[in-house]
Amino acid sequence: MFIVAAFGTLYTLVFDPNNMENHKKIEAVVRDLELELDGKKTQLESYKKEVKLVAQRKDEERQLSDLKIKVEAAAKRIEEATAEQSAAQAAVENAGKEWEDYKAEYRASTWAKAKGRELGTLKLADGTTFEAAVIRKIDHAGMDILCSSGPKNIKFENLPAELQDEFQFDLVKRDEFEDERHKAENMHIESVEYAQTAERCDAKIASLKEWKGKKVASEQAWKQAKDNVERYKVAIARKKADISAEKRKNLSKAPQMEIELRQMQAKAEQNSRSISDLDQARREADTTIRTLQREIDTLRDDLTRMQKEHAEKKAAEAAAAAGGTAPAAQ
């Protein structure tokens, strides 16, 4: 009987509908709690990501603020440097003008005092020697002397180096002086040959001035390119160091900086390649200038010869008109 009663009680506990219903409710509650817990975990992860993004945004805002400060400081430095550069340029221009004025005064005074100075034996750069030379006049074209063989005109570039240095001749001033002199002389000579020669001379002079400008520009560019080699080396090394430091940051701009580095390296290579081209250009300009100067000197000599012939012709015509004897051609 006891055993039968125990089985009955067990049956009641196990198969009682109320107990089974309670068991089902507990499982549902557990499932609901698990779902709710999963939702909370997802929400927590979302919150964590949002917090991280907020932190990143704050870091970006801080970096942006720092960059704005740096940009403003750089802009101020650029403005100050620009002002200093303008002032320095003005000072250089003023100093250059004062220097040119001083040289002009020095030339005028030294050239005037040199008149009548005895030079004794004068040996020129081309080897020509004049005995008992005395200075008659000095101008931008050169020196007029009186020597044992008579009056002579010597172009300044053919004078000894010590006299060139003492009298401070200037090639540009010489060209301007010769141009003005020949223009004035042209007005008094009516000759097709002379006019054509003068026209060729003027064209050569214009070309000479152009090539002198090219030479100055190519020399400046060549020197700048040579100076830029070291500047690029320093800038590239600094950029590489900045990239290395940038890569250690969480929010890194290294990729953009590496692009800038490659662009800088390309410019450095282009600059290095340009040096030989610029050097060749300045050498070509120098050669062309020497050639043009020789051609101009030859044309000027032709013009001087024609001027002399013209003067002799006029003198002969005047003598013939007066019933005198024409002078012998020299």
Image: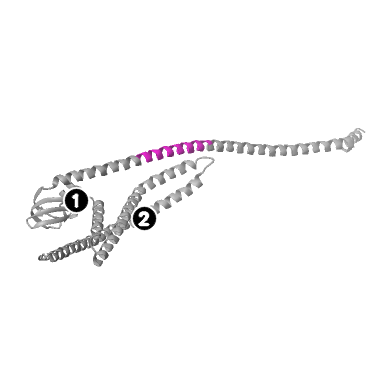
Residue 168: x and y, percent? Answer: 20, 47
Residue 69 magenta-highlighted:
yes
What colouring does the structure picture have? Answer: one colour
Residue 91: x and y, percent? Answer: 33, 39
Point out the frontmost of discs 2 and 1: 1
Residue 223: x and y, percent? Answer: 32, 50
Q: Name the image quarter holding residue 301.
A: bottom left
Near-viewer residue (118 or 308) = 308
Residue 133 in view: yes
Task: Give the SS element for disc 1.
Answer: strand
Q: Name the image quarter holding residue 62.
A: top right
263 with respect to 327 (left or right): right
Q: In the rendered view, tell whether residue 291 sits above or below residue 237.
A: below
| Magenta span dominant secondary structure | helix
Mark 1, residue position: 139
Mark 2, residue position: 274
**Alpha carbons under labels 2 and 1: distance apart:** 42 Å
